[in-house]
Amino acid sequence: MRTLILLIALGLGIPASTHPRVSSFKEEEISFKNGDIELSGTLTLPVTSGQHPALVMITGSGPQNRDEEVAGFKSFKIIAEYLSEHGIAVLRCDDRGVGHSKGPSVFESTDQDFATDVIAGIKYLETRNDIYPKQIGLFGHSEGGTVAPLVYTKYTGIAFMIIMAGPAGVSGADALLEQQFAIGKAAGSSDTEITAGIKYYKGLFDVLKKTKDTASLTAYIRNGAMERFNLLPPEEKEKTDTAVFIKTILQRDMHLFNTTWFRALIEFNAKPYLEKVTCPVLMLWGGKDLQVSRRQNEQQMLGALKKAGNKNVTSKLFENANHLFLNAVTGSPSEYKTLPKEFVTGFLPFISEWLHKNKIII
């Protein structure tokens, strides 16, 4: 039985990066407050004078730094600098409790909380003389792509939205079950192993939804660990300490699953919020993405936007892209570290062209 990867590989508390200033864009280290929480980040700006359109970037699952750095790939940094070179300001921040940002851990928070952090960033941008306040949009990756529609419903005036591999068409539980299936298949797991894994996680989600009782969750995970031990090959079982095996799984799974964030994640569904989004929307998909399924989400999201009366929606597939939009071999998260750290061909230019087409960048 394989462990859930979640909606993006976790970049646990990696400090924000610094780099020499590039002549084709400007950058500033900034901070602002969301109530008592101080958030820190980087604002990149075009070198031209005057007011600029802007977007706020929203990270995926787990504690992420402002670059959304995963396996050495600083995707948000690359996107921000490219887009600022092409005429738009970009704000990216360390998640609450990560890097230079203060506040409670991501695991103690929910998408509702993350939405308020994004809104605080928008309000900060609106105070600046070099930002055009009527042309501020959102860019959400993975779980960030489910937060973006929520922000839209909470704050008037969002001008556009870019959703990069966002599972905004289904619940978090359904997205994670689909992920479990896809990654298991890619790893060569047997149908029996995959079925057992999905059964385990369905049961886990039921326990989490029915009660906040830690004892019930502990008992369920312990029983699952025992079942997993019994499935080990005889030769491996002989050299494995049963008590240590179960204790290791119990500690690991309780650390993740018994959190405010995970309990809220599995129940959250962004689709009802997407049904209210009428601004221009760009959806980006990876054909080899095993963490968020285009097949599962795209039509649900298009239907939600149609229900909103939204007639300006673009959905773009990059056939060889994985969840990070790297050029993938299998799409498995296990290969992230070995792939060249650059986006698939055409990814960044397509975003820039879409912004130009929608007159966000003039």
Image (cartoon, rainbow, N blue to C red):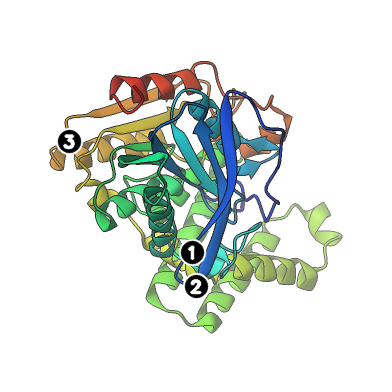
- The residue pinned by badge 3 equals 310
Q: CA distance from mark 2 to mark 1?
A: 7 Å
- The residue pinned by badge 2 equals 36
Q: Where is 9 relative to 247, above or below? A: above
Dot 2 falls on a residue whose secondary structure is loop
User: Looking at the image, is mark 3 or mark 1 earlier in the sequence?
Assistant: 1
Question: Which residue, as the protein is rendered here, is positioned at the far right?
Answer: 239
Q: Picture coordinates of residue 334 (x, y %)? A: 67, 38
Going 38% across and 63% down the picture, which residue do you hit? 112
- 2 vs 3, front mark: 2
- The residue pinned by badge 1 equals 33
Q: Answer whether residue 212 is visible to the viewer in this image.
A: yes
Q: Quadrant of the C terminus?
A: top left
Under mark 1, the amino acid is: Lys
Question: Which residue, as the protein is rendered here, is positioned at the far top?
Answer: 345
- 3 vs 1, front mark: 1
Going 25% across and 52% down the picture, which residue do you hit? 273
Under mark 2, the amino acid is: Asp
Q: Where is 117 relative to 218, above or below? A: above
Say whether residue 295 is left or right of residue 330.
left
Going 70% across and 51% down the picture, which residue do you hit? 14
Q: Where is 217 relative to 101, above or below? A: below
Residue 247: name its quadrant: bottom right
Q: CA distance from mark 3 to mark 1?
A: 33 Å
Mark 3 neighbour density, 10 Å: few (under 14) some (14–19) many (20 or more): some
Contact between marks 2 and 1 (CB within 8 A): the answer is yes
User: Looking at the image, is mark 2 or mark 3 earlier in the sequence?
Assistant: 2
Mark 2 neighbour density, 10 Å: few (under 14) some (14–19) many (20 or more): few
